[in-house]
Amino acid sequence: MAVDNTFIIKKIQKMDGFYTAFSPLTRMPFVECDQETLDDQVYVFATEEGVRSFAKEKEEQKIPVQPFKIPKEQMKGFLTSLYALAANAVVFNDETGVTRLEVDQLVPKPDMEKLSKEKIPVLNPTLTLTVLYFVQELRRPGEHDVARLRELEEEMVVNLIKSRFILALEDSEKGEDGTANLRIPFMKTKEGDLYQPICSDFAEFRKYAGANAQNYRVSNLYFADLERMLAKEAKGYVVNPAGFNLVLSREQIQKVSKEYNVGKAENKTEEK
């Protein structure tokens, strides 16, 4: 029998804001797979006390999470953004207890089929979700379940191979013939190593580029393009540098390409 959550949904819609649990390991909402329902869920709280109590429980499990307040004017945007994470459930906590809600009960789902046809990836939800699970486990303190970590890594790699990425090139001064000069942006580590930034979707590109987004030209990049498009001086790529900040070294790309028999892409990179 379906549960009528109309009252709770209306309550959330009328709130002046709510709190959520963010992961400092990914700089994105904390996502967890429910062991019974297998929902990929995020947590929302009516009070700061509630989210801090949740954070304390997770800290005892060696799982870092941080309270984060979502003001009223950003609530709808936050809930809509959960589709970009492939999260399908929200666990709402208030003084009356805990309520599990489907994300589409709170905000309508974007036309995913239309978005998937865009030349530049607007959303990349399955990849994002598998990376979040992998990074949350990899970077948390304490001992790790090696078998579980390997399983999460394999799921992530499968989605990396299937995904498209955004390669951003910086516009520089035009040449004498009037043609635009494009410069490859690099990110430098403390050790001085250079990496090229790429993004899994347009929202992550905007986070990375910020106010300078108009100074970039973006291209559609497939995994099979990565090695070919990597500059000689670069050690590899950083996927979503303003988000989960996943490093893919040249050696890792070559290894995955060999193990999964990834063919070289021809004429697939499209500029926009």
Image: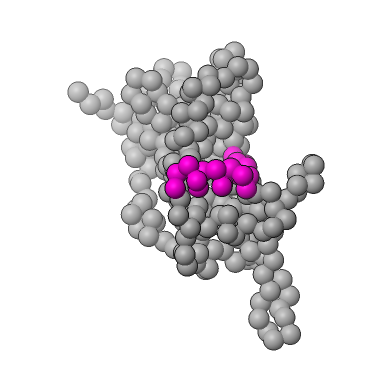
Residue furthest out toward the right: 191
Q: Position of residue 134 (x, y in %)?
A: 52, 32
Residue at point 79% right, 42% down? 190
Q: Is residue 102 above or below residue 36?
A: below
Residue at point 74% right, 85% down? 176
- State the extent of the magenta-drawn residues as a range: 242-261
Q: Magenta stretch: residue 243 in it? A: yes
Residue at point 48% right, 42% down? 259
Q: Is residue 224 visible?
A: yes
Taking 104 as reference, is 196 left or right?
A: right
Residue 2, quarter of picture: top left
| Rendered-image quadrant of the N terminus | top left
Q: Position of residue 91 (x, y in %)?
A: 42, 26
Residue furthest out toward the left: 1
Front residue of this view, candidates 147 and 220: 147
Residue at point 38% right, 43% down? 107
Q: Is residue 50 visible?
A: no
Front residue of this view, candidates 66 and 225: 225
Q: Position of residue 78 (x, y in %)?
A: 49, 41
Front residue of this view, candidates 245 and 107: 245
How is the structure coloured here?
one colour
Q: Magenta stretch: residue 106 in it? A: no
Q: How many marks?
A: 0
Taking 193 as reference, is 144 left or right?
A: left
